[in-house]
Image: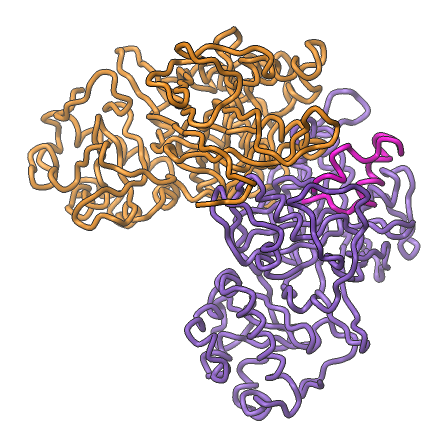
Chain colours: A orange, B purple
Amino acid sequence: MESWLDITPHSDFSLINIPFGIITYPGAGISTPRVAVAIGDQALDLAVFSTSQGFSKLPVIQPHLHVFHEPTLNAFAALGRPVHRRVREYLQKVFTKNGPYRELLQDSQELRSVSLIKLTSVRNYLPMQIGDYTDFYVGKHHAYNVGVLFRGPANALQPNYSHLPVGYHGRASSIVVSGTSVRRPWGQILDAESSPIYHPTKRLDYELELGAFLCKSNRLGTPVALADAEDCLFGYVLLNDWSARDVQSWEYVPLGPFNAKNFASTVSAWVVLADALEPFRTEGIPNEIDVLSYLRSNVTEAVFNINLEIFLLPGGATSGSVVSRSNSCNMLWSFPQMLTHHTVGGCPMNVGDLLGSGTISGPEAGMEGSLLELTRSGSKSFDVNGVERTFLEDGDEVVLRGWCVDSNGLRLGFGECRGKILSAWVNGIASE
Amino acid sequence: MESWLDITPHSDFSLINIPFGIITYPGAGISTPRVAVAIGDQALDLAVFSTSQGFSKLPVIQPHLHVFHEPTLNAFAALGRPVHRRVREYLQKVFTKNGPYRELLQDSQELRSVSLIKLTSVRNYLPMQIGDYTDFYVGKHHAYNVGVLFRGPANALQPNYSHLPVGYHGRASSIVVSGTSVRRPWGQILDAESSPIYHPTKRLDYELELGAFLCKSNRLGTPVALADAEDCLFGYVLLNDWSARDVQSWEYVPLGPFNAKNFASTVSAWVVLADALEPFRTEGIPNEIDVLSYLRSNVTEAVFNINLEIFLLPGGATSGSVVSRSNSCNMLWSFPQMLTHHTVGGCPMNVGDLLGSGTISGPEAGMEGSLLELTRSGSKSFDVNGVERTFLEDGDEVVLRGWCVDSNGLRLGFGECRGKILSAWVNGIASE
């Protein structure tokens, strides 16, 4: 399967991917955010493509073409996984060299000229309207590493850890799309004294996570059984759960993280559909206990083999480097298990809701998904191309990357999840 | 100031109140939720009232009459407090006997017959579309009581408690309007063994709270200064933060409450505007420490003197009784302080967001805002008209009530915040 588009082998957006996003771009009055797919180094504007009869050979989508004119992916997502699958497969054929639908785009210079846009000219938006956001804590190596720092190896993991996917409600309003700068937050932190001070965080951190968007709702009081959970998962993004560690350690008792997290969380712009990841299933971290019936799965390959890395470009430096490498197989619980646990008491989920995995660290040194782990809670600095770091400094830019490689050597990636640190406001008050 | 409507002295919805809500009612095709105010034992349909030139003497609202046809109060709220104030004062005049606007409604039998509806015929809806919901923990007596149960009196309050309004992100999707039944949730609970079982909660509880809806947004990265926070507060409701205590105690370490809370939270149907509560300002619980600058207020009367009570009607019983009485002055932090702390790191708030106070218990026996406190964590049962209870049983109905009385003896109340417990699903799976 080859494309008539020029797609380099190292492109994240190959023919086996076809991720969905929300874009605008300059020219011809395209100021209204609309749905697109990314392919190679271009985006296909599905609002333009659908209006120009691009989907004329796909009857199932005909009554729903309005979804491609929406400013979020929610309406498309709500059509359900069988429709996503058909649309993705259709677009793969459209992009295939001399394929069955070659007349639609490959042979139509006119439509190509108005619907294909260089990604470098595209502005991305948050792909979904997020009603509620929940962040889990299923990266067992991360939970263990952090537990060791705070409680020692013997008590690193809490008693509940292997019995349920631990999670907490996050803040939906502060989720931003890749490329959005992140202002260093002020907050209460404990300094040398035992009383807190009002100060910009001194321990600003990232967290390497995978996020899943939902495409199906359940009503209040009606749990989603594990067998039905996969159908609710629309697609996946990279997620950077920025964290202010000093704010967190002071505020989090007894109700959990709050201002330490709600100043910003960044997601990558292109949603990789659940179907696109099917070929990359693998086993997660084995659970040594016999889990309760509602969480018991007969799916052995319940997570994905996605290579993950964290790239850090220090403020003022001309080059950065990869500071950690991990893999999304380092999860104790799968997204279907997280969703089922979330709804076991009847909590209603809505299309567009976001679930975060929690930080995904690997089992060895060099695989830490946060600076908290990498620097042993700030006690050990590290080197980025000759620049020393413990926590993030103003001007630092963090890029999360994730990709899979199939048995034919074809690559499927997530694009960047990028954010740059802006200096804190003077005196805590916005001055721009 | 007297009304031409027959308003009994014990009505919550007196002329000094004028709370806003969302309703439908039978007849004439009124199936679309719209904005109304409650007055005495009736609702005034503001969609009908405004279409019939009811607001003709209030120029400021003329460009915005569409807000009364919306299915939530968000658009009305977004007009800002000066507009809410004008609309409320205008409606007070409309309802005043032989007042300046008597021709609009008092003297118009025709408009009265189509715009005034008995509350007993009205169906209420969730008053606002809630983007994010945050629950705080500012009821100091509650925090102390619960702390004593778990850690003893010496360590009852955590070190951060007096320094910041402790809070956590709640679940917006499971907030329901008064009258919605609450299904007993399944979940993981520790029984006699040290391993959890999958079971319906055995320790179902209520929490007596005050909720505040927001009417003003702030952008990501721009904190709301304490001096500006009052302008962001649209109005108040009663809030019952139903809690599964056994689920909570097992799951909440280290990230806070999750499934113990997200199965349902109930709000009263009518939003009492912030301006209506102005005459009832009073001092909260004094904070013995010198708080950090961004939380320091020169407003001494920063909370409200609202009488609160919890009425319990046991399942199968013909009568119930009040089991606790408290007052919303039992707060260590005010809503402006909660909002400012929430945004200190730049978290964006949106119109319609809900802030909960946390459980408001009083300082003495009989003032407990939860059964956890009233029964000393289930160790001590109590009597409701001859029926014994520790935690809630199936069929039990809980009604929160709140009201103020002004210096003239006039009453302003919140209406009911009511919910009835339905039995858990058999085997945990929805069967209806």
The range drawn in magenta is: B136-164
On screen, residue B293 above or below A421:
below
Identify the residue shown where x is 60% and y is 30%.
A167
- In front: B97, or B266? B97
Residue B233 sits in quarter? bottom right
Answer left or right for B77 relative to B157. left
Q: Split into 4 quadrants, where in the image is the N terminus of chain A?
A: top left
Residue B229 sits in quarter? bottom right
> Is any atom of residue B95 visible in this view?
yes
- In front: B201, or B112? B112
Q: Where is residue A425 in the image (x, y as percent from the top left)?
A: 51, 39
Answer left or right for B333 relative to A364. right
Identify the residue shown where x is 72% and y is 34%.
B248
Answer left or right for A184 relative to A6. right
- In front: A161, or B60? B60
- Furthest-top residue in this view: A364
Q: Position of residue B366 (x, y in %)?
A: 90, 52
Residue B314 sits in quarter? bottom right
> Is any atom of residue B247 visible in this view?
no
Identify the residue shown where x is 64% and y is 55%.
B212
